[in-house]
Image: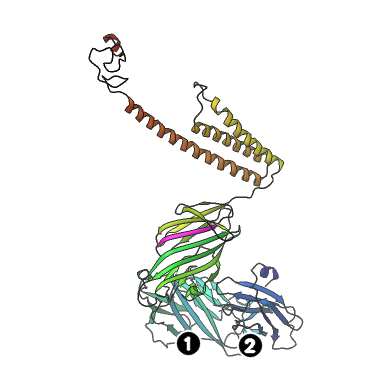
Amino acid sequence: MTQQAIDSVADVRSGPAAIRGRVVHENESANVGGLTVVLYALPSDGVPGLRGTVTDVMGGYAFETIGNDPATVYLLGTSYAEIPFGLRFSFEAGELERQLDLPVADTSSDTSETEIGEVQIEIQENCVDLAIREVHRLDNPGTRTLYIPESEREGREPILRVALPAGATDLQSRIGDDLIVEGDAVSFWGPLRPGQQELEFSYGFPKRGPAFEMQRSFPSGARRLVLVNRSGGPTLTRSEPADAALQPGDSVAIRVEVPAAVNAAERVSVFESRIWLEHDGAAFTVDAEHILAVAGNSPLVSTSGAPLFCIPLPEGAGDLRFSSETLRMGVSRDPSGALAVHGPLRVGENSLSLRFLLPIDRDDPVFTQVMSLDVPLLSIMVADTGLVIETERLHNRRPIRTSNRSHLHLEAFEISAGEPVALRLQPLEARRSMPRPAATGITLAAAALAIGFLIAPLRREGGEASVPSSAASRAADQRGSVLAAIHGLDEDFEIGKISEEDHRTMRQELRAEAVNLLRVERDALAETAEAAEATETTEVAAAPPPNTCPGCGAERGAEARFCSQCGAPFDEPKSADEAAPV
């Protein structure tokens, strides 16, 4: 592996421990200096790390300041004469130094005496599909490591070939097992060290009902096939005798019976879910807390190996961390990417808390969360670093102030299981001094707004000069000026007067102003319509009824010319010709 390839992967997590040792060859005179040794780390959260070094003239190497978490699996490896060699290990609790010799050897490509011993197949339920795990034991009775280099593979069979069943997906091999996927089969060309060696891999398989048959073929054969059945989990059976040997090319029908899944929703409910988001431009830091309530008289735990329920995580989520209470709930990362909860969950309230990082690859990142259970109240708090949030499902609450940060608070009620809740964040760019062309553009835009405001009253043609324009008209005129300023800004950008960044910043500001003016215009039109309706109602109610005095409201006599109560004169009745309609 080249140093460039090593540098392209994140470094292993730092810590107080060290690994030291030598690359050793059975022939002491062999040259083991200048070899690249790599250290691959796979923590429990699934985010790998890689570090490399080069051996000295005696084959010595050292890795300093690395983490010693016992849950982290390390793979130490090197390549000798183009053949990979490696070993796996983990630190013991509190261990600070590990001495490891890494053996290398000359190899042989003569695989005639190798045998495929026992094959184990086990099935477990995942969040989405079934997980099939296979372990193949290989026997090398010789004294040399067996390896078939790529230049010699033409026309030859590998040491082991395994045909995957139709529908298999997401093949995962154990660290250090050099398995190669070739079409619908898995091949192993070595290295196979003297003695017995296990190859382990797993793959997903779709759920096809409570009972179905799976066809498996064995191109390399095997001395024995073992079907592993865990208590409460899927049951595997075959029609042939369990200890019958498999000849190369044999095919076996395996019947799979999947027990009914535990309906966790009958005992588990959600009080509230809270999500805290912090956006730094490169990634989201997400802290989530789900308050669960478990009914019944005994803790809830999976007895079949299948998850009680799964919490979907956004695609790309990594660097998972859990609270100590959450770890006791039997949580693990499912192959589908979701968080699988196996239990036990104690009766009463449980707080499931986790943190993860979500990389961002766009200017307006979208955060989406799907709930696996019904959630009566979802609260999302977003660290306020100058953001505009767009969402359809959530509504705004008053911001929350912590000791050192203000958070925008959004809330939603009655989220259904499986319902996605999304919000889009648009960071506001920080204001800064602008180059001269940009400042000129802003000045022209401001001038356009001022002119629009001043001449708006003069734009009414045929109206009275003393009647001022309405608020709606003023907003419409100002909006027109802003749109004209945007058009001029676009022209300046097209001819190169301003940069792309300045154009985007100023255009966003002007567009926001135009949207605000549109809101003002609509609100003013609505208020005008309401006022007109109220005035019309008042005028109708104030109009005096016929045959009454307009002054005091007293009843008018048929021939009276003056009011008998207040003396006010009545209008002269119109003649028949005047009253007749034209």
In the picture shown, does residue 555 fall above or below 390?
A: above
Query: Residue 84 is drawn in which quadrant?
Result: bottom right
Q: Nearer the viewer, residue 171 or 563?
A: 563
Q: Nearer the viewer, residue 416 or 498?
A: 416
Q: Residues within 10 Å of mark 1 (few under 14, many from 20)?
A: some
Tell me residue 578's x, y (percent). Answer: 30, 10
Q: Main secondary structure of the magenta part?
A: strand
Mark 2 is on which residue type? Arg
In the picture shown, does residue 271 fall above or below 251?
A: above
Viewport quadrant of the N terminus:
bottom right
The residue carrying mark 1 is 223
Which residue is located at x 31 percent, y 13 percent? 571
In terms of secondary structure, where does tag 1 sit? loop
Drawn side of residue 36 relative to residue 413, left or right: right
Q: Nearer the viewer, residue 431 or 494?
A: 431
In terms of secondary structure, where does tag 2 sit? loop
How far apart are the two marked residues, 1 and 2, measured between alpha carbons? 23 Å
Magenta-tinted stretch: 374-388
Mark 1 is on which residue type? Arg
Tell me residue 485's x, y (percent). Answer: 60, 36
- Give the total number of marks visible in the rendering: 2
Residues at marks 1 and 2 touching, judged by CB atoms closer than 8 Å: no
In the picture shown, does residue 88 fall above or below 466?
A: below
Residue 375 visible in the current orientation: yes
Tell me residue 291's x, y (percent). Answer: 44, 67
In the picture shown, does residue 422 fall above or below 349?
A: above
Tell me residue 52's x, y (percent). Answer: 68, 74
The residue carrying mark 2 is 144
Please report whichever mark, 1 or 2, sits nearer to the chain's N-terminal start.
2
In magenta stretch: residue 220: no
Which residue is located at x 63 percent, y 78 percent? 149
Viewport quadrant of the C terminus:
top left
